[in-house]
Amino acid sequence: MATETTRPAEDARREGQAKQYGRIQRRLGLAGWILDAAVLVLLLATGWTMTLRDAAYSVSAERALALLVYLAMVAAIFEVLGFPLEFYSGYLVERRFGLSRMTLGAWVKDRLKALGIGAVLGAGLGELFYWALARHPGTWWLWVAGALIVFAVLLAQLAPVLLFPIFFKFRPIENEELVARLRAVAERAGARISTVLEWKLGEKTSKANAALTGWGATRRVLLADTLLEHHTPEEIETIVAHELGHHVHHDIPTSIVVESALTLVSLWVVNQALVWATPIFGFRGLADFANLPLVMLVVSGVSLVALPLVNGYSRWRERRADRFALRLTHNTAAFISSMRKLAEQNLAETQPNRVVEFLFHGHPSIAKRIAAAEQSQS
Ligand SMILES: [Zn+2]
């Protein structure tokens, strides 16, 4: 990237910062994962999970209620132990690199909202899980997977309308010319856009983002104010064209199918693990919710193994959406300059370590995306 820029020293400094930022966040992510796994192993190995279960049943003899109490206690343990890491990575590091614009109060408020949503979803999922285990001990994993698939489909549709507004403000974009340009590019892609909204991201972060969400009547384009501020209409058009690429290739429904297959596999592995472990740990049958730490360990183990596959598949879809955007807009220059601006705004490493990219990145590196665009031109 430095070869074509007029500010090579500035670019080198920024890339250095991006590498440092990436490294810190990766290490914190890994530390968080190890901490979670350690807590789960400890709960199982010490039998504390049984103690918590018995304490929950002393509050209520009703299984569904006792489960809620148990879930609340386990969640509280994770929250208390995980909070320092969460605060360091989500607040302090983001501020140190000049990315977050949130006050401590605003950050805490968002965190409480996320906890509330997590509590509702977690309680619902926990109840469903142990209901299925109790009622259908042989086929419970099919029931749970089926319910999760329905939930994923609903969430993909409803999250932009129900969940996003809990955290962000949106308002219609006033720039008529830009809206007309984006509607035109959508039409060329064979998609209709109902609304183009400005996504007030700038009060929280200097990072930029864009998304195309929903189907049919609720299909909307979300453009962060941070994106609108720094990108030209041509650049925004290539970014929306990339999002339209995801739409045209049915990337959201296909990723739901892939995730569902993964869910099914992981629940099947959980079933094997529970059948094996129940007598060893002395659980009172498959539906004994004291086995939750084991369930969580198995699920996170399977997703860890699947991570490189899921990310590889995602990078392939991203490359395809990039090619689509370039074919649709015929504007390689705008595509490349928008990529550079995004890297700068989001403090993304343009050339991450190959192994890091392979394991952790859902997008190809900026350097690769730019190289591919240049190649498609020649
Ligand atoms: Zn994309």
Image (spheres, helix red, strand yellow):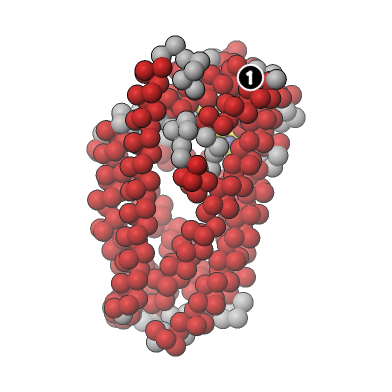
Give x and y (percent) for residue 66.
37, 75
Position of residue 316 in the picture relative to residue 290 (left or right): right
The 10 Å Cα crowd at callout 1, few under 14, some 14 to 19, many 20 or more, is many
Position of residue 88 in the picture relative to residue 240 (left or right): left
Amino acid type at circle 1 is Thr
Residue occupying the point 41% across, 76% down: 291
Q: Between residues 254 and 133, which one lies in front from this camera angle?
A: 254
Give x and y (percent) for residue 45.
32, 77
Report the image quarter containing ligand 1.
top right
Q: Secondary structure at mark 1?
A: helix
State which quadrant residue 327 falls in: top right
Quarter of the rendering occupied by the C terminus: top right
Residue occupying the point 63% across, 19% down: 332
Give x and y (percent) for residue 313.
61, 47
Residue occupying the point 70% across, 39% down: 249
Residue to which mark 1 is pinned: 332
Q: Is residue 230 above or below residue 294?
A: above
State which quadrant residue 69 falls in: bottom left
